[in-house]
Amino acid sequence: MKELEPPLIIVNFKTYLEATGRRALELARKCEKVASELGVSVAVAPQAVDIAAVASSVSIPVLAQHVDPYPPGAYTGSISIEAVKEAGAVGTLVNHSEKRLRIDEIDEVVKRARDAGLEVVVCANTPEVAASLSALRPRFIAIEPPELIGTGKAVSKTRPEVITDTIKLIRQVNPEVIVICGAGITSGEDVEAALNLGAQGILVASGVVKAKDQEGALRDLVNGLVRGARFRFRGV
Ligand code: G3P
């Protein structure tokens, strides 16, 4: 299924060699396999040049890692909303800590993507920034403390208050937005902890892409997602 629905795991391929070109396809197929075996939503975010090949080979949602806020036209080197959509992406990350935009540019992306029927996951580095960005009415916000990215120290265990504060502040501005979190997530326990804190999904990169056994690492995360989703469903 190509829709982006919580609870979900988004695997960001970044520009890691282990997830570039042919290896992007292989990793996307592993993600598709685990998603269908365990019946959960797993989306992948390959590099822009790999979107078309990945999207035509798997039936899970494919996201761009970034788009620029410009309309089609004279914007050499930019990544357009129209191009990623045409290539088969159902959505895009935007304002990742490694590819930030100004707030007026994020606003433009959210509006133009909405018009184009593309999902947007807006990344934020702090709870306060996340709450401000939720006023732009994206469907998803991903909170990621940059200092934990790639460290293996999970936000859900090392800085749980970042998740709870983000949800609390966002809810005061926009009760609809789906809040996910990322940074340092490497195990099912990390994912389960994130859901128990109120997150509706996670964004992960190195914990899957750089793992010796990518499929096994993702399966562990997905099992954590399933356990966490059950916990939330019981309303404990
Ligand atoms: O977009 C996901 C990300 O920035 C988290 O990276 O390597 O800590 O899972 P990582």
Image (tube, helix red, strand yellow):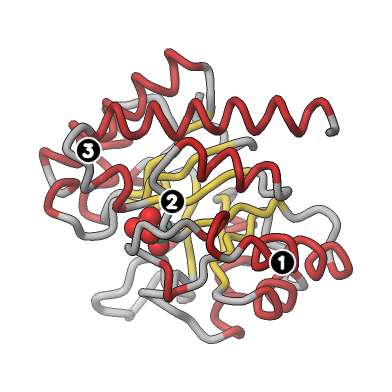
**Residue with the mark numbered 3:** 53
Neighbour tally class for label 1: few under 14, some 14-19, many 20 plus, Cα within 10 Å = many
Q: Residue at 41% x, 50% y: name it.
A: 204
Q: Amino acid at mark 2?
A: Ile
Mark 3 Cα-neighbour bin, 10 Å: few <14, some 14–19, many ≥20: some
Residue depicted at x 81% and y 53%: 176
Question: Which residue is rendered at x = 59% and y = 48% of the image?
Answer: 117
Instruction: Point out residue 122 in the picture as x, y percentages from the top left corner.
Output: 57, 64
Give the Cα distance between marks 2 and 3: 27 Å
Task: Give the label, 2 or 1, closer to the camera.
Answer: 2
- The disc labelled 3 sits on which kind of residue? Ala
- Is residue 178 shown to the viewer in this render? yes
Against 35, is 213 above or below? Answer: below
Q: Is residue 103 above or below residue 184?
A: below
- Measured Cα–Cα span from mark 3 to mark 1: 35 Å
Q: CA distance from mark 2 to mark 1?
A: 17 Å
Give amino acid for label 1: Thr
Q: Which residue is mark 1?
A: 166
On screen, residue 225 versus residue 99, left or right, reads right
Residue at 20% over, 35% down: 25
| Percent of width and height locating residue 190 | 51, 45
Dot 1 beta carbon under 8 Å from ligand 1: no
Asked whether the beta carbons under mark 2 and mark 1 sit within 8 Å of each other, the answer is no
What is the secondary structure assignment of the residue under circle 2? loop
For mark 2, what is the residue? 185
